[in-house]
Image (tube, rainbow, N blue to C red):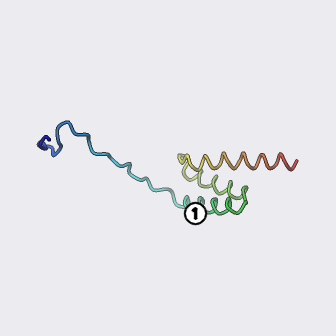
Amino acid sequence: MSEPNSTGTTPGALPPVQQKSAVPKPPGFAVAVLRAKDDESQGRFEDALREYEKASALDPSDATVKHHIAILRDRISKENDLIH
């Protein structure tokens, strides 16, 4: 095995894995997501959708929230089709 060089790394070794720095979410984001999850688990899908939309407005880059929005919109649409 090679000895570390002057930079403290071993020649030929892979560089250390760099962790992505966690970007803090905007105030209110976590509360909106928690409310949405609670509403969703209780079958209040329109309320859950509104809360996820609030969270998405606070952090438009959050793909998980966008995914939940798409699922809920589809579910609500299908339920409305069954009613009408």
Q: Quadrant of residue 41?
A: bottom right
Return the residue nearer the eye: 54 or 47. 47
Q: Quadrant of residue 7?
A: top left
Q: Which residue is mark 1?
A: 31
Residue 32: image location, x then y, percent: 60, 60
Q: Is residue 70 above or below residue 47?
A: above
Q: Is residue 37 above or below residue 70?
A: below
Q: Report the side of 28 relative to 15 (left or right).
A: right
Residue situated furthest right in the rendering: 84
Q: Quadrant of residue 48?
A: bottom right
Q: Report the side of 10 relative to 36 (left or right).
A: left
Mark 1 is surrounded, within 10 Å at the Cα level, by few (under 14), some (14 to 19) or many (20 or more) other residues, namely few
Residue 4: image location, x then y, percent: 13, 44
Residue 68: image location, x then y, percent: 63, 50
Q: Report the side of 79 relative to 7 (left or right).
A: right
> In which quadrant of the rendered image does the N terminus lie?
top left
Return the residue nearer the eye: 84 or 2. 2
Q: Residue at the location (77% across, 46% down)?
A: 77
Name the amino acid, label 1. Answer: Val
Secondary structure type for disc 1: helix
Residue situated furthest front in the rendering: 1
Q: Residue at the location (43% across, 53% down)?
A: 23
Count of picture labels: 1
Return the residue nearer the eye: 27 or 21. 21
